[in-house]
Image: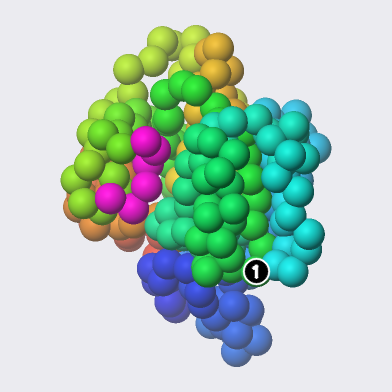
Amino acid sequence: MCFNAIHGHPGEDGTILAYFDLIGLKHTSAPFYQMALTFNKRDCLSVVKQYGIKTATSYYIDKGAKINVKEIIAKVGLPCFVKPNNAGSSFGISKAKTEAEIIPAIEKAFNEDSQILIEEFLDGPEISVGVLNYKGKIKVLPMTEIVTENDFFDYEAKYLGKSEEITPARISDEIHRKIEKAAIKVYRKLHMSGFSRAEYILVNNEPYFLEINTVPGLTNASLIPQQAEAAGISLENLFHNAIEMALNN
């Protein structure tokens, strides 16, 4: 079997997993279609919205299409986030604070992908939630509150120490229950299996879904292992469980 730890293409977008299915090789990730769907931010948001999950207002642009900055601002407002549709590790993401910053942000995003989405700015704390299949049941790990020194949780904040990760998150039991309910619903409705880490923004104590990562970092310093440790699950047990679940699938 394969323990899939490949970020982006071809591990997180389902490409190599479709090949594994063809040759009958088991793996630790969700089925290839689920991986492809969740890697495509626009498609993933479209699906979860149908199940009552709150998301940011968004605007989509394909490369070569006419860009109407006034129309974008009318829909999502300022500031707004401009993101490549299929990219990880916050590559190509910008926070546009003024009308003049939108076109450069779009050009930057198009360097990473031919499809982009522009989302309204959601003002609130960011909560990262690990959900996985543990011993045959869906388990929500202790949540992490992201406190970044930068404008948002960008590449520097994620990988160069420009953020503080507080596990468990400093939230009330009521808010914890709301996020947990949403996280389990997303995991089930997307027919996920294996590891996942979803990001939510709290706005007026309501969780808004941003995205889901299906090949999250798994080093000692990564969020999923931090959350597992807070739940009393060692990295060894976490990996052993993933392998066991894959072999029994």
* Residue 87 image position (x, y, % from top left): 52, 62
Membership of 152 in magenta stretch: yes
* Residue 148 appearing in the image: yes
Q: Looking at the image, which residue is at 52% across and 68% down?
A: 112
The quarter of the displayed image where residue 231 is located: top left
Q: Nearer the viewer, residue 241 or 55?
A: 55
Pick the residue in front: 189 or 150. Answer: 150
- Say if 94 sits above or below 73 in the image: below
Q: Which residues are magenta?
A: 151-156
Does residue 117 belong to the magenta stretch? no
Horizontally, residue 148 falls left or right of residue 104, namely: left
Q: Nearer the viewer, residue 193 or 179?
A: 179
Q: Quadrant of the N terminus?
A: bottom left
**Residue placed under numbered mark 1 in the picture:** 114
Q: Residue at x 30, y 26 (%)?
A: 168
* In this rendering, position of residue 202 left or right of residue 241: right
